[in-house]
Image (cartoon, coloured by chain):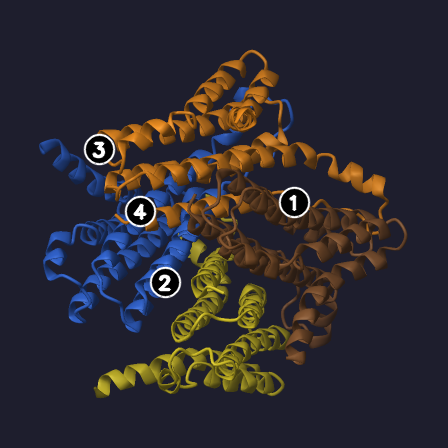
Chain colours: A brown, B orange, C blue, D yellow
């Protein structure tokens, strides 16, 4: 298969999901000529929703950047790989649902579990990309593979597994895990830059 | 016409339909601080919907992979072929409607018939791609055409025809036909791999 | 500007509008286990909507094919042309609104006028592409320009002007004009083929 | 990273946001066979919404054209730049929300402030593109950078800052600022052309 078309198709799905995520923020009914404080109180319930949407936005962008880097290392992919990619896109497409549910009920067990499982499945499928690609010799250059390292998916897999466990102990710990994933992604890169 | 642009345009439609399919799963109203079992019962009616969406997701992905393979065999297509492709995209664009209807009423005759007719028209149009392309010598390489075989659309055409018939006898048989289509697509490929 | 990116951007808009058009068909509330005839009567009000959506789908596809052909004749376009293209995309983006209104009230004067004006503005902007491109020597090859001919936009401009006039005489004449536009596009091409 | 894919991904987001903006115009409930004047009065509340949507449409198109020009000057971008671009896309994705709110309540303080802050953040991020790119030597050609000039983002930054201040004095001044931004963009280009 031509990687260009697989990438373009995936980018389409990524772009649409990102866009629609934020569109889920519905404008509340507010009487005309309301004061700033009235607006503030009408908007307050949207704040947890907005935070959840930004979290998912960032997690999807992390996947997009990883997807981009990963595909650049590959020779033309097989049909099997394209289907693995389709499975990955299914998890991405599903994300707005647990995101909206978590935004509505940020401290309930079920939304947290659903969100964590959805993210875990996406991270596991991304991890499977790597194994599939090495098993089927899809990498254009083996040196590049090692340089790439497993940084992208492994920490996410661990954190989302932890958040599932924590959901049965203390939901705030689970929520903390969600926010640790982007930190684990950004902080090392920033530290590296500082050291250089 | 430039095949690149026809493909990019089709990929756009494919990506948007896939994404919007899953977005049709609306988050139900649930009181805050509900228990896991409360959530489970609130989510239960969504399960047939989710299954129907995943089914359509897979059927559209099958079309996308087939479309991709097919266009790679072609020389620059004529305007007539572009219009045949537009007709195919019309059926694809229509799919969320019967999918949602079937998700709401999975054992009713009308949604099953509508779903089957929609899928049948898409499969027939895909089949027409092949005839049109051979009649107008659009294939870059005639050997490739035979290798491609009619595996993609013929089984789907037969199964959706059967499901229309079965809708007047027993709706569960029709539903079974729907799920056989992806099996007929995946199982032979897997068996081939095992044998090798 | 790079024509590739202008085309890709326009294709994105075309693909999304086509997809969302059909999604406007909302699934009606139907009690479970309804008979075929019950469904038929519940679906009946959707028929004019579906016809209107297919009409707009076809009209947008005509624009897409024309846009594709047109851009292939061009050298890298100027920023002014990109803005003319953005104006064209604005009319395209607006189309779902009059389409939905016409689908709800197919024989009312206002929806017919709004639909016709929207389509007229799109066709006029497409026509302006040609004048702008010749005035600014954007065509890669002047021979091609004549071969292209004004077939695409002129008949549409005339028919939509007529439909605006007819809206004040007899709305059915206006509706007829809408359906004549695709016929004027398809029939000549088919006749040409027959003669050859 | 490959600039092609970053651009294609951004174009996807731009195209979807533009399309969905206009779709937010919901068709009002109107009894069948209403007169033109009835329709006119039913449509009247949509006029401020439509104007706001067109304003945001134009502002996003200005960003798109600027984004296009800017990326053409760049060598392959770093991962840091891709994340700056993701941040920019976050502001773009958020725009439908304040646009809808402003369309509902065009003379209220809160919607005006939210709209101005959203636009300001987008313009500041675009401005940061330039600084980041010069600091990291991402420009392919240094001469081009000066020619490009800061015309795109600086006037927008100033106008949106002013509109935030004016929101506490007179909301109509703020609204005027919003409409001055596209004028500041279009008028100089037109004058230049006239002089030539």
Q: Is residue A161 left or right of residue A132?
A: right
Which residue position holds label 4?
B3
Mark 4 belongs to which subunit? B
* Residue occupying image coordinates x 85% and y 59%: A172
Co-location on one chain, circles 3 and 1: yes
Co-location on one chain, circles 2 and 3: no
Label 2, label 3: how many angstroms apart (C-alpha)?
31 Å
Label 4, label 2: how many angstroms apart (C-alpha)?
16 Å
Question: In terms of image quadrants, where is residue B37?
Answer: top right
Label 3, label 4: how many angstroms apart (C-alpha)?
15 Å
> Mark 4–mark 2 contact, CB under 8 Å?
no
Label 4, label 1: how many angstroms apart (C-alpha)?
37 Å
Q: Could you say which disc has been placed on residue A118 in the image? A: none
Q: Could you say which disc has been placed on residue C5 in the image? A: 2
Would residue C35 be visible to someone looking at this image? no
Mark 1 belongs to which subunit? B
> Mark 2–mark 1 contact, CB under 8 Å?
no
Is label 2 or label 1 in front? 2
The image position of residue D138, as x and y in percent, is 46, 77
The image position of residue C163, as x and y in percent, is 26, 49
Q: Residues within 10 Å of mark 1 (few under 14, many from 20)?
A: few
The image position of residue C25, as x and y in percent, is 49, 40
Q: Could you say which disc has been placed on residue B136 in the image? A: 3
The image position of residue A20, as x and y in percent, is 57, 55
Which residue position holds label 1?
B26
Q: Secondary structure at mark 2?
A: helix
| Whether residue D70 is situated above or below residue B3 in the rendered picture | below
* Residue occupying image coordinates x 26% and y 42%: B75
Most foreground residue, B36 or C56: B36
Co-location on one chain, circles 4 and 2: no
Q: Earlier in the sequence, mark 3 or mark 1?
A: 1
């Amino acid at each position: 298969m031509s990687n260009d078309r697989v990438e373009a198709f995936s980018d389409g799905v990524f772009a649409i999901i990102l866009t629609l995520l934020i569109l889920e923020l519905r404008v509340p009914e507010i009487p005309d000529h309301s004061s700033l404080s009235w607006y503030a109180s009408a908007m307050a319930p949207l704040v947890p929703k907005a935070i959840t949407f930004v979290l998912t936005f960032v997690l999807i962008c992390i996947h997009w950047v990883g997807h981009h880097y990963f595909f650049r290392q590959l020779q033309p992919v097989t049909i099997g790989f394209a289907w693995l990619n389709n499975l990955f896109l299914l998890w991405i497409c599903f994300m707005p649902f647990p995101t909206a549910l978590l935004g509505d009920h940020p401290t309930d067990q079920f939304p947290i579990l659903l969100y964590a499982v959805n993210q875990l499945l996406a991270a596991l499928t991304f991890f499977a990309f790597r194994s599939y690609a090495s098993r089927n010799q899809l990498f254009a250059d083996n040196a590049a593979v090692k340089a790439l390292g497993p940084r992208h998916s492994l920490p996410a897999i661990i954190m989302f597994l932890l958040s599932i466990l924590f959901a049965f102990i203390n939901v705030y710990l689970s929520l903390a895990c969600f926010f640790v994933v982007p930190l684990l992604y950004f902080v090392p890169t920033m530290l590296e830059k500082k050291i250089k």
